[in-house]
Amino acid sequence: MVERQGIVVWFQHMKNVRQLKKHGHLIHVSKKHRYAVIYVNREDIDAMEKKFNQFSFVSKVERSQKPFIPTSYENAIPDKAKQYDYKMGI
C-alpha cells in the first residue's frame, strides 16, 4: 500500500474545486468555510503543495498531521476492579 497524507487547501471560489480535483483524491469540500481536503501520495506531497500554492485562487495550503499522531494508548484496558462495579441506581 502507498502511504498517503491529506492536504487542506483554502480557496476563494467554489468553481475552482474542479481544478483541485485533478491533482489528488478529493475527500471533502466545505462550501461555507471554502476549503477542500485532498489526499495525495506522501512522496509527492512537496510537489503538490508547491503546485497548489501556484494557483491564483488558493489562499493557503496546510498539511494534515494525522499520520504523525500516535494511536496506541496505554490505558485502553479498563481496570479489573471497576469492570464489574455496576451502579444499580439505589
Image: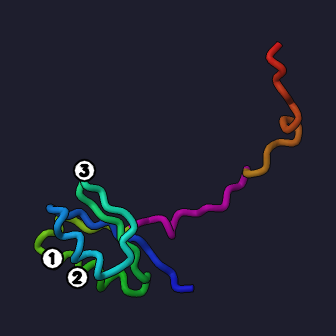
Q: SS for tag 1?
A: loop
Q: In this view, does 2 lie to the left or right of 36?
A: right
Q: On the image, numbered disc 2 is attached to which residue?
A: 51
* Lower position in the chain sequence, tag 3 or tag 1: 3
Instruction: Looking at the picture, tell me which residue is in the foreground, 13 or 62.
Output: 13
The crowd level at tag 3 (other Cα within 10 Å; few <14, some 14-19, many 20+) is few
Q: Where is residue 80 in the image (x, y as percent from the top left)?
A: 88, 42
Tag 1–tag 2 contact (CB < 8 Å) = yes
Q: On the image, numbered disc 3 is attached to which residue?
A: 32
Residue at 82% over, 42% down:
79
Label 1 is placed on what type of residue?
A: Phe
What is the C-alpha distance between the residues marked 1 and 2? 7 Å
Quadrant of residue 89 within the rendered picture: top right
Quadrant of residue 52 within the rendered picture: bottom left
Reply yes or no: does residue 1 show up in magenta: no
Residue at 15% over, 76% down:
55
